């Protein structure tokens, strides 16, 4: 029993490092928390962006989102990205966005009705957060009240955990505003 728990922990750590590497982050630059739970389908904890930004230990440990907790997330998402950069400042290129989206394919596809670790991103622009029937969203995401406008996606894709604290999405974010604008342009073609 102990050997199987140790093997499970090692496998979970490896899976998180592979996901982080696939998302364009160096595994050495992240911190990883691994937990063993009865629900092996729950996503791993998000890596911390830096020493001052702590991610939740694990989705199972994250408190349930309340209306009061969801309001700050929606407010944060509506604010301009760090440094006052806004989506309107960029012209997205769908072809380049398809290349950037390769990182996202670890968890997402932009095909109608196809969910993976993350929900389908088909027709995501204009959709309400947490609205795909049957997909297991975090309470924070499901109750955020966010509508995925181009501006909301631009902010969210920079740092998902900061925009919706408690989201299950373990992606560290796209730091390049041009990459975010390009991915949004690509996603707009998928509807």
Image: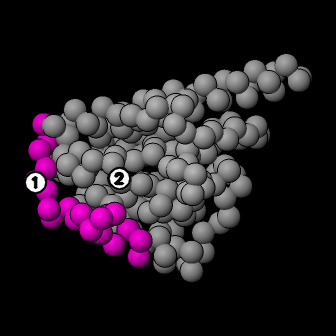
52 horizontally vs 87: left or right: right
Whether the residues at callouts 1 and 2 have beta carbons within 8 Å, the answer is: no
Q: Residues within 10 Å of mark 2 (few under 14, many from 20)?
A: many
Residue at image location 13% in from the left, 37% down from the top: 95
> Disc 1 versus disc 2: distance between alpha carbons?
16 Å
Foreground: 159 or 59?
Answer: 159
Q: Residue at x 21, y 36 (%)?
A: 98
The residue tagged 2 is 157
Which residue position is annotated with label 1?
91
Q: Quadrant of the N terminus?
A: top right
Vertical side of 17 occupied by 182: above or below = below
- At a point 60% along the width and 69% down the height, the residue shown is 65
Image x and y of residue 8, in percent: 73, 26
Q: Position of residue 77 (x, y in %)?
A: 38, 68
Q: How many marks?
A: 2
Sequence order check, earlier mark of 1 and 2: 1
For mark 1, does the 10 Å Cα neighbourhood hold few (<14), some (14 to 19), or many (20 or more) residues?
A: few
* Residue 62 locus on image (x, y percent): 66, 58
In front: 140, or 130?
Answer: 140
- Element marked by disc 2: helix
**Residues shaded magenta:** 75-95
Q: Tell me: 102 left or right of 95.
A: right
Q: Residue at the right extreme?
A: 1
Q: Is residue 78 magenta?
A: yes
Q: Secondary structure at mark 1?
A: loop
Could you say where residue 129 lies in the image, as x and y percent from the top left?
Answer: 41, 62
What residue is drawn where x is 44% and y is 63%? 163
Left or right of residue 108, residue 169 in this image: right
Can residue 121 be seen here? The reply is yes
Is residue 121 highlighted in magenta?
no
């Amino acid at each position: 029993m102990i050997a199987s728990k140790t093997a499970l922990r090692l496998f979970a750590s490896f899976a998180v490092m592979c996901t982080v590497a696939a998302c364009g982050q160096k595994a050495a630059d992240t911190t990883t928390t691994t937990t063993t739970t009865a629900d092996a389908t729950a996503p791993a904890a998000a890596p911390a962006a830096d020493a001052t930004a702590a991610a939740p230990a694990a989705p199972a440990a994250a408190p349930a989102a309340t209306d009061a907790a969801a309001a700050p997330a929606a407010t944060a998402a509506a604010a301009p990205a760090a440094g006052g950069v806004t989506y309107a400042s960029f012209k997205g290129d769908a072809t380049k966005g398809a290349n950037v989206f390769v990182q996202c394919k670890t968890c997402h596809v932009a095909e109608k009705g196809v969910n993976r670790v993350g929900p389908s991103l088909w027709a995501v622009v204009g959709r309400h957060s947490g609205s795909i029937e049957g997909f297991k969203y975090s309470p924070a995401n499901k109750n955020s009240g966010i509508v995925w406008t181009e501006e909301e996606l631009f902010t969210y894709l920079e740092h998902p955990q900061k925009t919706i604290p408690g989201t299950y999405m373990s992606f560290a974010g796209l730091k390049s505003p041009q990459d975010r604008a390009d991915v949004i342009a690509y996603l707009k073609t998928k509807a």
